[in-house]
Amino acid sequence: MALIVQKYGGTSVGSVERIQAVADKVCGFRQRGDDVVVVVSAMSGETNRLIALAKEMQTRPSSREMDVLVSTGEQVTIALLCMALEERGCPARSYTGGQVRILTDSAHTKARIQDIDDQPIRADLKAGRVVVVAGFQGVDEQGNITTLGRGGSDTTGVALAAALKADECQIYTDVDGVYTTDPRVVEGARRLDKITFEEMLEMASLGSKVLQIRAVEFAGKYNVPLRVLHSFQEGPGTLITIEDESAVEKPVISGIAFNRDEAKLTVLGVPDIPGVASRILGPVSDANIEVDMIVQNVAEDKTTDFTFTVHRNDFEKAEEILQGVAQELGAREISGNNKIAKLSIVGVGMRSHAGVASKMFAALAKEAINIQLISTSEIKVSVIIAEKYLELAVRSLHSAFELDAPEVVSES
Ligand code: ASP
Ligand code: MG
């Protein structure tokens, strides 16, 4: 008998029929003797609908009132799911975030969980009930309703699993697991049986939107085994866990992540003197623009080029700021490019294998794809390339690192 926390996302509870199907599934686990705590999202589209309603009332509604509003979506699904469970003879009880006392800080719309009282949940489980908790929401010291940021129900699930020391936190969604890369781009993309927290974080932050990043961080920190599964298809899903030190044959690369969200800016001919990087990036960060990759080369003469990337939405603003900075610094000129894509190979196996980056570069060279920027970390190599080559690049790397599913014959 296990204690399992199951989280069902918006599409999994998107209609009456689907909520009923979830109830059938939960009943099945109960009948096998497991203790089950269920976390649900709002019905799909509901949170967006509520946000749209708010915009009709006020141009800039306060974040406190936004939380009162958007938290209602999840309150609907917990009650409906409990009714469906009771109808099936499966005793169940619903709780809002405030009722279980998921205590958060007061940062409305992006609150962080500080503490969870697991006693009421344990008492219900002991009495043979399924506990259904509203995802995405909590309550602060003063009793105000808070929410955890979009996609926050994942975090609720993980936090409850950590507080209850559950055997597993299962995230049920509309995909059957985490893939080596986006199956829409690479036909041979494969579901991974297992991936480490670290790798998942890299994949998630690079745009694989299966899980909320914060939920993965939380799971890693408290070592909660996380499993991503399809809500209505049978299958083992993908287990996200700690690195298996004993595994003999670890894959070098677990996945390829990419995004088209970034833009690149270069200040050319900046004087090679102390303080320049800070004078360039200071005003950028003052304008609340996040910088991702940063590259500066060693200067041969007395000037150097300074390149960095920002979110595409911040491109124009950053360029404008740089115009001013460049003049002050006596830099030669500024160039920018927002038709770029970032592509990364990710894998903990990189730590123990040499030549991973050169293999990546060789595969790109074979397709005559120019690399504009390179950055690396212990378990990741990222490059910036022209956006128009992105799909070709992902496909060729996927086969170069032998990630393709066996039944698919690769073209390259
Ligand atoms: N309903 C919330 C959202 O759409 C939370 C969640 O689904 O995880 O962001
Ligand atoms: Mg979600």
Image (cartoon, helix red, strand yellow):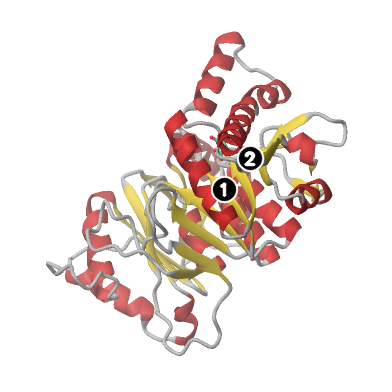
Question: Position of 127 compared to 183: left or right?
Answer: right
The image shows residue 262, relative to residue 316, as above or below, that is: below
Residue 135's disc number? 2
User: Looking at the picture, how far across and down is residue 243, in whole percent?
Assistant: 55, 77
Viewer-proximal residue, 343 or 15?
A: 15
Location of the N terminus by quadrant is bottom right
Q: Residue furthest top?
A: 57
| Structural crowding at the residue carrying mark 2, measured as other residues with C-alpha within 10 Å and reported as few (<14), some (14–19) or many (≥20) | many
Q: Is residue 230 visible?
A: yes
**Image-quadrant location for residue 77:** top right
| Structural crowding at the residue carrying mark 1, measured as other residues with C-alpha within 10 Å and reported as few (<14), some (14–19) or many (≥20) | many
Q: Within 8 Å: ligand 1 and the Cβ of disc 2? A: yes
Residue at position x 60%, y 9% in the image: 57
Report the Cα–Cα distance between label 1 and label 2. 8 Å
User: Looking at the picture, how far across and down is residue 377, in whole percent?
Assistant: 51, 71
Q: Is residue 333 visible?
A: no
Amino acid residing under circle 1: Lys
Q: Which residue is mark 1?
A: 7
Question: Position of 131 compared to 9: left or right?
Answer: right
Location of the C terminus by quadrant is bottom left
Q: Secondary structure at mark 1?
A: strand
Cβ–Cβ under 8 Å for marks 1 and 2: yes
Q: Residue furthest front?
A: 89
Question: Position of 232 compared to 43: left or right?
Answer: left
Residue at position x 39%, y 61% in the image: 235
The image shows residue 73, relative to residue 354, as above or below, that is: above
Amino acid residing under circle 2: Gly
The image shows residue 355, relative to residue 29, as above or below, that is: below
**Image-quadrant location for residue 105:** top right
Viewer-proximal residue, 337 or 375?
A: 375
User: Looking at the picture, how far across and down is residue 16, in whole percent?
Assistant: 46, 29
